[in-house]
Image (tube, rainbow, N blue to C red):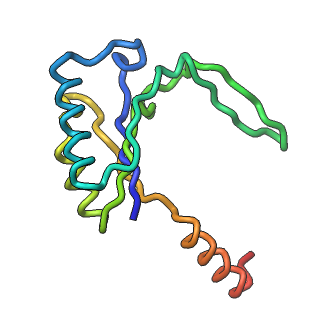
Amino acid sequence: MRFMIMGLGNEATEAGVLPSDELIAAMHAYNAAMTEAGVLVAAEALHPMTRGARISYRKGKAVVIDGPFTETKEVIAGFWIIEVESKEEAVAWALKMPYVQDGEEGVEIREVFEVPELDERIAEERARGER
């Protein structure tokens, strides 16, 4: 099973404030531990939303909105994709993360839909006449 651990951003990350040297070193150690355990698939930090865009759809047309965006409460500052045996194992790895500090939102963990799983679900829905 693959899971994405998303590090949530805040005003500091969106202002482009870099983490302390200590936190950067701790994050490198965290990533190295996941690599050594064979669970890390990818890990990346994201630039602030000022360098991004959102696309929304209205009446069948795409509308591109350049950042920054008004809401910073649900901004992703970085992510890890890990491959583990269960959600509990993904949570255990997320709990080892040195990222979270008092008052910060923390992280979100989501299971990745694997293509065979998605294809199977679509086939099941079609067989039931739901599609």
88 above or below 92?
Answer: below
Q: Quadrant of the C terminus?
A: bottom right
Of residues 46 and 33, the one nearer the viewer is: 33
71 above or below 44?
Answer: above
37 above or below 48?
Answer: below
The residue lying at 79 percent from left, 35 percent from top is 62
Q: Is residue 20 left or right of residue 58?
A: left
Of residues 37 and 17, the one nearer the viewer is: 37
Of residues 35 and 21, the one nearer the viewer is: 35
The residue lying at 38 percent from left, 39 percent from top is 43
| x, y percent for residue 130 | 71, 79
Report the number of discs. 0
Q: Is residue 116 left or right of residue 77?
A: right
Q: Where, by quadrant of the figure, is residue 18 drawn?
A: top left
Q: Quadrant of the N terminus?
A: bottom left
The residue lying at 79 percent from left, 38 percent from top is 58
The residue lying at 56 percent from left, 18 percent from top is 51
| x, y percent for residue 19 | 26, 18
Q: Is residue 130 left or right of residue 103?
A: right
Q: Where, by quadrant of the figure, is residue 126 drawn?
A: bottom right
| x, y percent for residue 118 | 59, 69
127 above or below 73?
Answer: below
| x, y percent for residue 84 | 31, 62
As drawn, the residue found furthest toward the bottom would be: 127
